[in-house]
Image (cartoon, coloured by chain):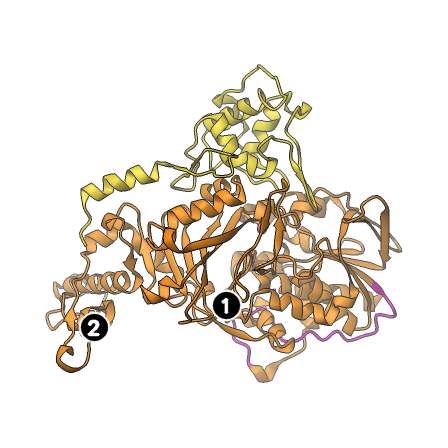
Amino acid sequence: MKWATTSAVTALTLLSATAAIGQDGTAGRRTFSDGYRFVEMTGEELFANVCQGCHMPDASGASGAGNYPSLAANKNLESGGYPVFLVVNGRRGMPAFGDMMTDGQVAAVVNYLRTHFGNDYQDAVSARDVQDARR
Amino acid sequence: MNAVQNGSVIKRRDLLALIGTIAGSSAMYHAMTSLGFASESAYKGPLKLTGDPKGASVLILGAGLAGMTAALELRKAGYKVQILEFNSRPGGRNWTIRGGDSIVELGGFKQKCEFEQGLYINPGPWRIPYHHRALLDYCRRLNVTLEPFIQLNHNAYLHATRAFGGTPQRIRSIKADFQGQVSELLAKVTQQGKLDESVSKEDQEILLQSLRAWGALDRDYKYSANLLSSEFRGYARDPGGGLSANPLPSEPIALSDILRSRLWRYLQAFARYNFQTTMFQPVGGMDMIGKAFAREVGDLIRYNAKVTQIRQNGSGVTVSYVDTVNPSAVQQATADWCICTIPLSILSQLPVDVGAPMKNAIDALPYAGSVKIGLQFKRRFWEEDEAIYGGISYTDLPIRQIAYPNYGFNRSGRGILLGAYLFEGANSYEFTAMTPAERVASAVEFGSKIHPQYKREFETGVAVAWHRVPFTLGCSGEWSDAGRAQHYRNLCQIDGRIVLAGEHASDLPAWQEGALLSALDAIARLHERVVKT
């Protein structure tokens, strides 16, 4: 039972892998981070692996005893600083993701959101903007 | 929060909670001197509310354990009690999923549980520590039968993807080898005189004796492959009968390999206060507790009631709600007082007449992400093939844990595993973002790295991601130390005619005990105020 270099290579391949799942066709491949922080880097990937858990794959939100707001065609996204602040610091039931994403990741997912789902705000936020939003 | 009476070490958090609350709640508890409660529990025995509430009425929001505890005690004390509950069942997060159950999560994703009759999964709370005295007391009073919850099974696995070629290791072996080799090292430096400054010569002799016994060391204070260490870590061949009786020693894993594997970090999961033996679970599913409470107070509950607004003035409380089945007409319930157990993830979205300090506290608490996945298999291969009876295997794979059923041991036929248990961290969000079917498929995929039988034996599964649960929008209040210091006391104060209760209003977040202690504390303070006015 010795720790072997060859097995480490195999293991690394497995960990960084995206599992091919999705018989129901909603999503082809999933990414799994290997620690507390997210490894997803693009805005699209971050949205699909994090945000859509609550805000749903089409960003339309959901309603139960309480609501997850729709992010589709959402005027609150007009100023990039607002979603940046919420992702970094959280609000009400929404967790803060500031410790789980880099400045670049927050900027990527906010920029993706502000240019998709019926949103068309072309003034991209930068990693620097995110840094300023950290309390 | 009566820790001050115990006179022992008080945590900073406890201190904060204590300030201003000592005179009220602690005085209300019935003295239970004969039981000699140990210092670990804030529970002082059954609540005794003395004094006449003079016909006062209380409206309770939420029929979870906090709400039903409050209802049970307040009705007994003479209050007029009614409960509004969003779900069509009692219990809230005290919940068990069985075959035939339908689950619709936020977004409309629907699951039909196809488990065999008698098999179940507890998607929320699933274990009860022995020191959760309030919950255990209510279980006794409400005739909820308990059985052991196996937290530590020496024959379950520890698994690290990048160590030992991905082969899972028995907890037994890692624990014995880690303990043995640390003992060997300590014995070595003791013999080299390196502890002379801190340990007397006489004590060093005793220390060496204890290390030999504790670490399974040989005469030379070495931990090595022999029948002595095998008695702890297991044998290469177990003792038998007849001509093949002699056991063969097994080969220890080198300390360096254990250190680099990081498997040692899981050993503390068994040592922590919250997870020490004895732990319990209700026979038949955790919801036996919620059902037992509902036998007492079920007649007070208005189900399918979605609260939309909470108003108060000098004379009473008015709560607006709609029927979830027929939401067109807004209805109202009124009472002199209100105990609100609605999770803050939801309450923060409602119009609520409370002062700024409480409102700020309500808005300040994020809710943890958590996912549990139940998997049914054609046979109990973990018992039949691997001799794992109950307990938990830990892994660094995204599923984090595989928990084996603590009931139905050694039976033939089907069984259910908890195939994933995630709490916070990136993976809990990634699993939440999937469809239920994807979560189940992922759990099977990852679990098969630990149990290769998975793919052949898997039949059906259910997955609960707590951020998608319509009645909570999250698992539990996730307090930071700073947030608690700033807001916790404001959250727990009586604001006019409204007081909050639930695990979020306790220092035991995510535990059922926290919900109960919070409710008991709140109603003791409320009753004191009612009796005085």
The chain to which mark 1 is attached is B
Camera-near label (2 vs 1) is 2
The chain to which mark 2 is attached is B
| Residue farthest toward the left in the current orientation of the protein | B220
Separation of residues labelled 2 and 1 (CA atoms): 34 Å
What residue range appears in magenta? Answer: B36-57
Say what amino acid the circle numbered 2 marks.
Asp
Residue B183 seen anywhere in this rendered image of the structure:
yes
What residue sits 11% from the left and 73% below the top? B219
Q: Is residue A11 above or below residue A115?
A: below
- Among numbered discs 2 and 1, the one appearing first in the sequence: 1
Instruction: Say whether residue B262 is left or right of residue B482.
Output: left
What residue sits 77% from the left and 74% below the top? B76
Instruction: Pick the residue in front: B369 or B377.
Output: B377
Say what amino acid the circle numbered 1 marks.
Pro
Percent position of residue B89, x then y? 69, 59
Predominant SS of the magenta segment? loop
What residue sits 54% from the left and 22% below the top? A111
Disc 2 element: loop
Q: Is residue B344 above or below residue A106?
A: below
> Looking at the rendered structure, which numbered label has been put on residue B129?
1
Residue B204 seen anywhere in this rendered image of the structure:
no
| Residue ID for mark 2 | B238
